[in-house]
Amino acid sequence: MDTLNKILAGLMTRYQQRVTDVNKIALALKDRGIINDLSDIENDHIAFRTIGVSQLGIQSLEKIFLYHGYMARDDFYFEHKKLNARWYAPPENHLPRIFISELRVNDFPADIQSIIRSYTDEVKTDPVEELDLNNATEVDEFLHSSLWRRPTWNDYEKLAEVSEYASWTIYNKYYLNHFTISVHNLPLPNNTLEEFNKFLQEIGIILNNAGGIIKTSNDGLLKQSSSVSHMIDASFADNEVRKISGSYVEFAERKVLPQYTHLQEGEIERKHRRDGFETANADKIFESTYSSQTGKTKN
């Protein structure tokens, strides 16, 4: 478990350095006395994006987390975005769930497939098979490594025209896409997404409004919001620097399941709340890195 904790800590450390909204939110929560430290926030889940080719994709990346005790749960299919996804339950309740998605490369026109494979074909075999999964440093370096050459801006633009998920992933690779604050475990009155979103907007966090600010599951028990990704300086081939979307922060409220509503606040554990994910919610959360949302930011 120590190795897994180190892997997760490495992901979060680099993610926080890149996503300034994380510290902005944490500092505001501390200033208002809602939390004492970032560690007081429960991480509901973290998410990765991958390219669905034979030697990569979900089947490759998941091996790291399955090895360390995560259990595969439900699969999801996003027809319009041409994505598949799977989520994983952690070996211990204090750890985040994991959500891994992949681009269905074969669903794209031949010219787009050719661009994607010109990069992914540089990875000849499943790279996770070569890792010492007991070595946290090695795994951490892999998750932040350049799997293929630096893309050209021209290729990035061509991919973005048909799939902004594809362009994001060709550039960012396994860089952590988002982490998620478990709003329901914050102190009253900030433990509902409606109230927490008010707080976020007060401190200047721009929220993804695709499908509404709050995306709600059909059963009404899972509510999700997300920030809009900030634009970051990205270096492309030939040292061309352009602004592209980075990562973002998600916020989730998991309500108590009907059979456990009799429990007192102090008795409620993770197992008593709505688990898993919702396709319709996730479909709109993906758009936190899309130009339709990032165009609202001033960075």
Image (cartoon, rainbow, N blue to C red):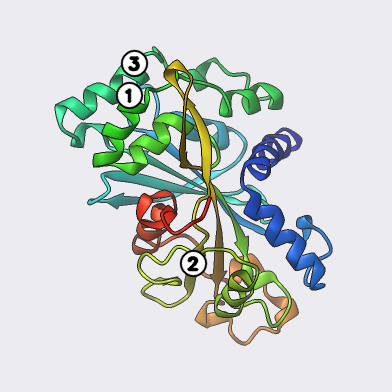
Mark sitting earlier along the chain (3/1): 1
Q: Mark 1: few, some, or many residues within 10 Å (few <14, many ≥20)?
A: some
Residue at the spot of label 1: 54
Q: CA distance from mark 3 to mark 2?
A: 36 Å
Q: Position of residue 16 (x, y in %)?
A: 67, 45
Mark sitting earlier along the chain (3/2): 3
Mark 3 is on which residue type?
Asp
| Residue 121 marker | 3
Q: Which sits in the foreground, 265 or 244?
A: 244
| Residue 11 marker | none
The residue at the point 29 percent across, 21 percent down is: 117
Give the position of the N terminus as an image quadrant. top right
Q: CA distance from mark 2 to mark 1?
A: 32 Å
| Residue 224 marker | 2
Mark 1 is on which residue type?
Ser
* Callouts 3 and 1 close, C-beta under 8 Å: no
Q: Mark 2: few, some, or many residues within 10 Å (few <14, many ≥20)?
A: many
SS at mark 1 in the image? loop
Q: Position of residue 168 (x, y in %)?
A: 41, 38
Residue 259 vertical position relative to residue 29 in the rendered view, above or below: below
The residue at the point 64 percent across, 28 percent down is: 140
